[in-house]
Amino acid sequence: MSNMHILISYDIPEDSRRTKIHKILKSYGQWMQYSVFECADLTETQYAKLRSRLNKLIKPEEDSILFFPLCVCCQRKIDRIGGEVPADRTIFFA
């Protein structure tokens, strides 16, 4: 199975929890905007571990984290205006 490309958005009202969430997500992907990360090339195991780590931190009655899996076709259709372009993790062999 191919690796996963996930767009993650979160709404965490408490600063300390939000900071912890941000640090975890930063270790898995690229910070795109204030509450948005793009995680490319995650294996299913990495994705499950990420979800588990985040789930342990949040307060479900106050916080929310949304995961948007993007298929290869959808990844090619991402349209960007401004901001940081995600790092190209593609490796080419000649």
Image (cartoon, rainbow, N blue to C red):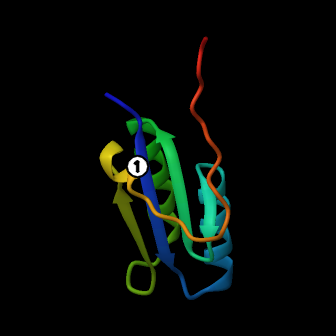
Q: Is residue 69 left or right of residue 50?
A: left
Residue 23: x percent and y percent?
A: 68, 61
In the rendered view, tell whether residue 86 sits above or below residue 81: above
Residue 60 position by quadrant: bottom left
Residue 48: x percent and y percent?
A: 40, 46
Label 1 sits on a secondary structure element that is helix
In the rendered view, tell whether residue 74 sits above or below residue 23: above
Residue at horizontal 54 percent and vertical 70 percent from the top:
36
Residue at horizontal 55 percent and vertical 63 percent from the top:
37
Residue 63 position by quadrant: bottom left
In the rendered view, tell whether residue 61 sits above or below residue 21: below
The image quadrant where one finds the N terminus is top left
Q: Return the residue nearer the eye: 69 or 55.
A: 69
Give the tally of numbered discs.
1
Residue 90: x percent and y percent?
A: 57, 32
Residue at horizontal 36 percent and vertical 61 percent from the top:
68
Q: Return the residue nearer the eye: 18 or 82.
A: 82
Q: Residue furthest top?
A: 94
Residue at horizontal 53 percent and vertical 57 percent from the top:
38
Q: Is residue 20 left or right of residue 63?
A: right
How would you rate the neighbour count of disc 1 (Cα within 10 Å): few for under 14, some for 14-19, many for 20 or more? few
Q: Return the residue nearer the eye: 13 or 94.
A: 94
In the rendered view, tell whether residue 26 sits above or below residue 92: below
The image quadrant where one finds the C terminus is top right
Residue 89: x percent and y percent?
A: 60, 36
Q: Which residue is mark 1?
A: 76
Amino acid at dot 1: Arg
